Image: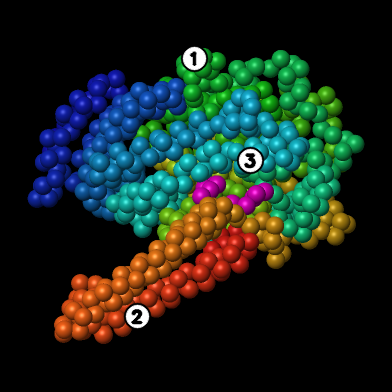
Amino acid sequence: MGTRWTCSGPSILAFLCYGQLLPWLSTMADPSLGEFYNETEARLFLQLYDQTAQVVLNQFMEAAWNYVTNITKTNREEMLHKEVERSKFLTYFGTRARLFKVSQFQDPDVKRMLRKLQDIDKAALPEEELQEYNKLLAYMKMTYSTGQVCLNEGPCLTLDPDLKEIMANSRDEKELLWAWQGWRDAVGRQLRSIFPRYLHLSNKAARLNGYRDMGALWRAKYDSDTLEHDLEQLYQELQPLYLNLHAYVRRALHRFYGAEVIDVRGAIPAHLLGNMWAQSWVNILDLVLPFPKKPPEDITKVMKGQHWKPVKMFQEAEKFFTSLGLLPVPKDFWKKSMLERPSDGREVECHTSAWDFYNGKDFRIKKCTEVTMEDLLSIFHQMGHIQYFLQYSNLSVPFRTGANPAFEEAVGSVVTLSASSYTHLFNRGLLSLQHQDSEEEVNFLLGIALDKIAFIPFSYLMDLYRWKVFDGTIWKTIYNQEWWNLRLKYQGLCPPVPRSEDDFDPGAKFHISANVPYIQYFLGTVLQFQFHEALCKASGHVGPLHQCDIYNSKIAGKLLGDMLKLGSSRPWPEVLKKLTGESNLSTKALMTYFKPLLNWLVMENVRQGEVLGWPDFSCSNAERKINRAAFLGLELEANKVVFWQWGLLSLSFIMTFIALGLACRLYSLEKQSLVQDSTILSSLTYAYFLGSTVEPRQAARRQWVLLAICLTFMLCSIGFTIWIFTQHHRTPLWVAVRWWSED
């Protein structure tokens, strides 16, 4: 039989397991020893991987956590060191997993785990390039996490909470523009120069894993040959809902900001929608409320009036999950998580995230919590991730992920649909009136749509953009241009100020600077409504889907828990069918949820004579020319082009006078020499001209030719000078206007 290994458990140091592993791996690498490729040995190999992974991955997660909760050079170096160890570990097991004849095996779990191990992502890179890649990613994340926008006289503002608060609450268009542009200058521009190198290394890692580019590697996680087609179909089915929402919001913003800012047939300026990235519009609900005489209660104000604290918000979310009969979080969760921004001055990464430390008992959330309704729902979402971690923690490490990445996001979001329902908020003491009339119901649904529906095209185009960058469809010379082309096409948004290729606005979004795929959020938006519909049916809910609250339903909780326990041990269509009875993604539940709102939006837009979409609209216009130009092959700011034009003009004058002076001087000297030495020259048969021996008369002719050349050069310089003067106050012929003015 084969070699047997023992590892005492996840507490033992990883290198002890490596010590048992390496002799076996060297034997296994000999193709003549076919017995080491059989299914029994594969199970033992996977058992060793599982035991070792819990140590190596736990150590890496600890180092990464220490860095993002205390951004220092020391913690960064330790994280990068552990990242190298992690990559070596994945490479060892990944390359050996490829040696097994998986197609000949019978056990589907063994086959599935080995195939998961074979994709080792960036760990496939050579060591030097891997270290470079890790440093690039760390720099990109640090730039995002520590970015600040400074006032001319006053403090510097961070994204969270300062700039987010301005974008959410300010109604001053100039202040919104200041925050919007400042953040992109502080972050996106800093990442522009290194992004092509990151792209090159990403694609190299993908090719070493057997994929065409990194986009193909990301898409492979969904086990679908028709993924791109399916995504486009889902988007097209949801587009009518988005277009009606867009047209209605555009009209409302036109009323508030005026025709100088909003074109009722065009795109919406991206800084006016209450969010730094215009991915959620819920913060402008007060500007677009259908029935302003019946405004919804301000739940954030109620929470603050009831003296809610961040810890209470997390406790409220946990109470929801335990009411379903699901698992409570471990006690250490409350000790080790970062539930609000530290008050000790540490630099931290505030982007909200949930963490699994791979030991089956340590789970944490990192969030700079503010007492708001938006943050409360975000906490419910993150606690959904934690519940997923808890439920599949007994599985082998390769199966400790969602059925696909979209499932993880959908599970986090499905509970927010109940938690934000009018019924639940009333029962939790956050609303004072028990029932809604039809107008209040439309107001309520619009608030949900400004979050969920506004997000749909953004969540789709984020990876659509990166896939095109990865496969070379979008060149590095047009990164920013194509970003805004996609945002115009899918979202109907334009930047509020001209942009150029010195800008890199995609990098101002965390998931791009942190190398995190995004398509799972688009698919998760669709899935969460499928999940919600199934759980509501299980709970016995009768009535409109948006009124359902599964709180306290043990039946719904068991149905959800049984799905979560599977992790990624089964193909995702099978997992989906277990919960919903369907094996395909469907927009039907989402459209059912928003049907009352869609009906109202359609009637209102028809009444107003709205044009859906932004037909024939371009973000460029005569007043929005990029103050940027190309000069003699160099890209410069327009004011610098003017400087160099004058410099070239001055140089032309100088060279003209020098050439003229030299010609006159040479002619004078040669003529004087000929007059003084005419007697001598008459007796000679040769003379000298610029060091060459020629006949005396030929020397005289060449002097005149040289003088003519100098005079010609002088006239050309004068003509060039005159042309520069005539071009100075208009666009010079050699100045190419940047892409923005070319649409």
Q: Which residues are magenta?
A: 495-507
Kind of residue indicated by mark 3: Trp
Which labelled disc corresponds to residue 180? 3
Name the mark nearer the viewer: 1 or 3.
3
Nearer to the camera, 13 or 20: 13
Name the disc covering residue 670, or none. Answer: none
Mark 1–mark 3 distance (CA, rounded to whole Å): 36 Å
Residue at screen point 47% across, 17% down = 336
- Residue 438 is covered by the magenta coloring: no
Answer with mark 2 or mark 1, whichever residue precedes in sequence. Answer: 1
Residue 501 part of the magenta-drawn span = yes
User: Is 629 located above or below residue 78 in the figure?
Assistant: below
Give the answer, above or below, for where 69 lies relative to 657. above
By secondary structure, the bulk of the magenta-drawn segment is best described as loop
Residue identifier under label 1: 335
Residues tagged 1 and 3 counted as in contact (Cβ below 8 A): no
Where residue 102 sits: x, y (%)?
27, 50
Element type where label 3 sits in the image:
helix
Which residue does the image show at 14% across and 37% down from the upper left? Answer: 24
Where does residue 188 sit, x and y in percent of width and height?
52, 43
Q: Is residue 139 left or right of residue 77?
A: right
